Amino acid sequence: MSVTIGEFSKILIITNDIKIRHNLEQVLSQFYELFWADEEKSALELIKSDCPNLIILALTNTEINNICLFTQLRNKPETALISVIVLTTIANPRQWRTAMEMGADDVLFLPCTDTELHKAIATRLTKQTCYLAYTQQELDQLRENIIKFLPHEMRTALTGILSASDLLINQQYSLNWSIIREMLICINSSSQRLLRLIDNFLLYAELKVIENNPDITQLYCLHQIDSVKEKIKAIAHKSAQKYYRQDSLIIDLQNACLQINETNLTKLIEELIDNACKFSPEHSAIHINSQIDKNQFILTIKDYGRGMTHKQIASIDMGIQFERNYYEQQGFGLGLAIVRQIAQIYKVKLEIKSIPKQTTIVKLVIPLADCSKNSTYSKITHISNWYSTQTININYSF
């Protein structure tokens, strides 16, 4: 939905009062494109066919509680941002408050002046325009990041594979065994990097589909995993091993049974430890602690690294990497975006607190489960079965 303040802005006016319609037409017709409905049903049909920028709902004796328009608008993403101004002859401040609580953006008591009405409309359209401009700016930034960094990520991994394999092919008889082993390790690590990038893209796409399907989401909330203490510890050590940071880990965990499956708990821990290792100094500590409080398992991961600003935390999403122009770093910004998506599906509360250039604290508040009731759903439903079963691991022993 695009918004232009002035003659191109479309306003739907809902009223069955002939006098109100005549007055509004005189006041607004020379500034806006107007179209009309005399009741909610026909208004909703018009909204579907020709989405307005703003709606004016004129009420005379109708109780605001009987209006279903607000619910209908807010339940659909394509209409949720449409501003609604209520004009009412009901001299009851409680009714005005009810209108605002139901979703009205403004309430004007009739009779009102032409200036009051014009200012109310201009305010709503301006706010809408600013929001859409900001959203477009964010989309443009995401598009720019995809164009700029995705090919770089894929090319970097492929360059390592091609360079090492070319050397093995063209100089195989002149290379000693230690050089050959080094080339094989290079091919392996570059392949793993490319595979992880592709896997994360596929997983993120799958999570977005699941997020928009309430029936599937309810099934995932039945997952369970028990004895998490040793499992989290093992996942953390394996993730830190890639950066030779096992000695940085300081772990203090409680055992519990959690309302999440092992595959997705593993992914949460992997991505958070990966970030902690990647964005903190080599010999600095990484604390992994847990506590149980009010039927919740609170897992905290703290590092002493680059940190993030409040704006950066709010901007976490696919393709968003912070300060990449200043820092050389791998990845495509998918890690925290995936963590956030899994957390939403499993109703896990995700909290991130950070002080730039000092520390980052990530807290996961995971519901406890009763593992004495063994859930069959844990065995048959997983986010991304391909992720847990088709990851390729190539290990060489020499």
Image: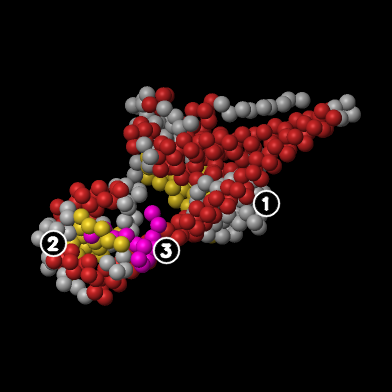
Amino acid under disc 2: Asp
Q: Which residues are magenta?
A: 1-13
Q: Is residue 4 magenta?
A: yes
Query: What secondary structure is the magenta-colored segment mainly?
Result: loop
Q: CA distance from mark 1 to mark 2?
A: 65 Å
Q: CA distance from mark 3 to mark 1?
A: 34 Å
Residue at label 2? Answer: 17
Q: Residue at x 56, y 35 (%)?
A: 199
Percent x, y for residue 81? 34, 55
Residue 157 shows which numbered tag?
none
Percent x, y for residue 340? 46, 45
Percent x, y for residue 319? 55, 48
Residue at label 3? Answer: 130
Q: Secondary structure at mark 2?
A: loop
Q: Nearer the viewer, mark 2 or mark 3?
A: 2
> Which badge, 2 or 3, is on the more N-terminal residue?
2
State how the image is colored.
secondary structure
**Total marks placed:** 3
Amino acid under disc 1: Glu
Q: Is residue 332 visible?
A: yes
Q: Is residue 179 left or right of residue 228?
A: right
